[in-house]
Image (tube, rainbow, N blue to C red):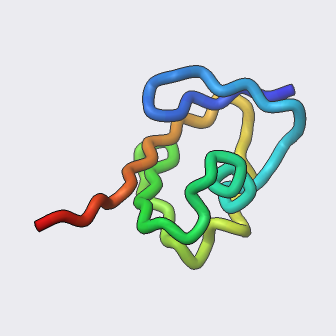
Amino acid sequence: MITLTVNGSPQPLEAQINLAQLLENMQLTGKRVAVERNGEIVPRSQYAQVELQDGDQLEIVVAVGGG
């Protein structure tokens, strides 16, 4: 089991996953999001390659359109 901090809240996970899988679990696939991992922006092209580790701190921002 690993624990991440996502937007300031602890998020326990049963198994190690990558960033793309986390976003899918959070139902954010296909939405315009920006992700910061441990203080560094993660390019969208690398989401599937970024294996999340116990203690990682993530900030996930979802873009909202409006007018």
What is the tally of numbered marks visible in this picture? 0
Front residue (pair 32, 55): 32
- Residue 19 placement, left or right of 1: left
Q: Residue farthest to the bottom?
A: 45
Report x, y in % for residue 46: 61, 72
Q: Is residue 35 left or right of residue 56?
A: left
Q: Residue at x 29, y 59 (%)?
A: 64
Work out which residue is located at the far top of the displayed protein and give it: 10
Residue 40 placement (x, y as % from top left): 43, 53
Percent coordinates x, y for residue 19 in the rendering: 66, 56
Residue depicted at x 84% and y 43%? 16
- Looking at the image, which residue is at 68% across and 61% down? 20
Q: Is residue 63 above or below residue 14?
A: below
Pick the quarter of the image with the C terminus: bottom left
Residue 3 vs residue 25, the one in the foreground? 25
Q: Residue at x 45, y 25 (%)?
A: 8
**Residue 55 placement: quadrant:** top right
Where 12 falls versus 58 (above or below)? Answer: above
Quarter of the image holding residue 7? top left
Report which quarter residue 11 is drawn in. Answer: top right
Q: Is residue 4 left or right of residue 37?
A: right
Q: Is residue 36 above or below residue 11?
A: below
For the view shown, which residue lies furthest in the left direction?
67
In this rendering, position of residue 14 left or right of residue 47: right
Q: Name the quadrant of the N terminus.
A: top right
